[in-house]
Amino acid sequence: MPPTLRNRLGDLERAVLECLWASAETHPDGLTVRQVHDTVGVERGIAYTTVMTVLDRMAKKDLVRREREGRAWRYRPAASREALTSEALHQTLGELSGGNRRSALLHFLEESTPEDLDALKAALAQLEAAHPTEASRPPGRTPRT
């Protein structure tokens, strides 16, 4: 499935994913349509069949995984919140040319809080430690293959 489809989640799809992510620890095998409806559908006044249709479409978009349990399906997120967010960011940045991408990143950083910048610096340091670049390798050392 092209990543652009995953970026364009509707309001109900987002609510369903939030419900599934929130329940992942207590229900690792996923939730039934009834359980999702009891959380998302009831509070929004949405019919059970609407939630069922949305979950079916989300499964076809690879946003959720489903497994048969008797006559019902159990649904769970196909990716974590962080992975889906990362995919959306990569897709958005990928649509920009080099100079525009750099400008967008700079604008994002200028609008970030000091806490966000500290978290980004820590993440970059962790990434560099885990995957040293050619420039940061001691002379004479070659990467493992």
Image (spheres, rainbow, N blue to C red):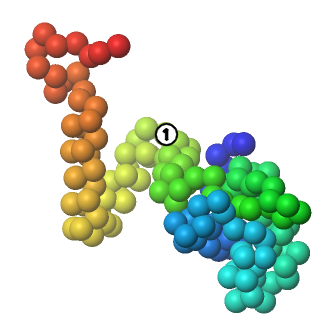
How far across and down, in percent of the image, does residue 63 sit? 68, 55
**Residue in view at x 29 percent, y 15 percent:** 144
Q: Is residue 107 left or right of residue 137?
A: right
Decide which of 7, 49 is in the foreground and name it. 49
**Residue in view at x 71 percent, y 61 percent:** 75
Task: Name the image quarter holding residue 69.
Answer: bottom right
Among all residues in the image, which is located at the extreme left? Answer: 139
**Residue in view at x 59 percent, y 61 percent:** 28
- Residue for badge 1: 97
How far across and down, in percent of the image, does residue 40 sit? 70, 80
Secondary structure under badge 1? loop
**Residue in view at x 28 percent, y 55 percent:** 120
How far across and down, in percent of the image, does residue 47 sit? 85, 82
Decide which of 67, 141 is in the foreground and name it. 67
How far across and down, in percent of the image, does residue 124 sit? 26, 46
Q: Does residue 140 show up?
A: yes
Of the 4 image quadrants, the one containing the N terminus is top right
Q: Is residue 127 above or below residue 75?
A: above
Task: Name the image quarter holding residue 7.
Answer: bottom right
Q: Is residue 135 left or right of residue 1?
A: left
Q: Does residue 14 show up?
A: no
Residue type beneath disc 1: Ser
Decide which of 88, 28 is in the foreground and name it. 28
Crowd band around label 1 with a 10 angstrom C-alpha radius: few (<14), some (14–19), many (20+): few
